[in-house]
Image (cartoon, grey):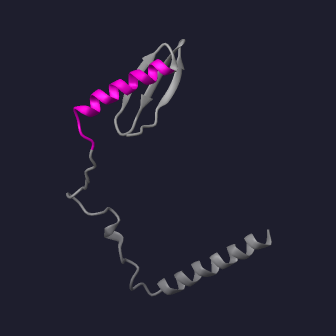
Amino acid sequence: MEMTVLIEPINGRFKASTSQPVMMESEGASREEAIARLQELASTRLASGEILQVSVTRSDSEHPWMKFAGIWKDHPEFNQFVRNIKEQRECDDETKSES
């Protein structure tokens, strides 16, 4: 497994850290020592654990915008509204091409 590691100089030492898939940090007198310690820590933690992906959903409520779905369906001015949007976009396109 490959992990992205951030190396930071801190007060004459070096800190190596990861955030994904597991947050870990180590320090050392050199970059190499900090990285080696992080690799040891990762090997130990990952050997005793397991990485998997799970799906998390909210089943207690529907999507918050669902209550608005279709509210303009039978509005008498909806088609004109859509035409106005189309015309405005065409004007915007013409203005951009003139610039």
Is 65 in front, or is 24? 24
Q: Residue at x 69, y 77 (%)?
A: 91
Is 26 in front, or is 10? 26
Residue lying at the far right of the rendered structure: 99
Span highlighted in magenta in the image = 32-51
Give left or right: position of 55 versus 13: left
Q: How many marks?
A: 0
Q: Position of residue 67 (x, y in %)?
A: 31, 69
* Quadrant where the image shows the N terminus: top left
- Residue 25 visible here: no
Residue lying at the far left of the rendered structure: 60
Give left or right: position of 88 versus 76: right
Give left or right: position of 64 versus 48: right
Q: Residue at x 49, y 30 (%)?
A: 6
- Residue 15 visible here: yes
* Quadrant where the image shows the C terminus: bottom right
Compared with 75, 52 (above or below) is: above
Q: Position of residue 46 (x, y in %)?
A: 28, 33
Q: Position of residue 30 (x, y in %)?
A: 51, 16
Residue 38 lies within the magenta run: yes
**Magenta part, dominant SS:** helix
Residue 40 falls in which quadrant of the image?
top left
Q: Residue at x 54, y 19 (%)?
A: 9
Q: Position of residue 87 (x, y in %)?
A: 63, 81
Give left or right: position of 88 versus 48: right
Residue 35 lies within the magenta run: yes
Residue 23 falls in which quadrant of the image?
top left
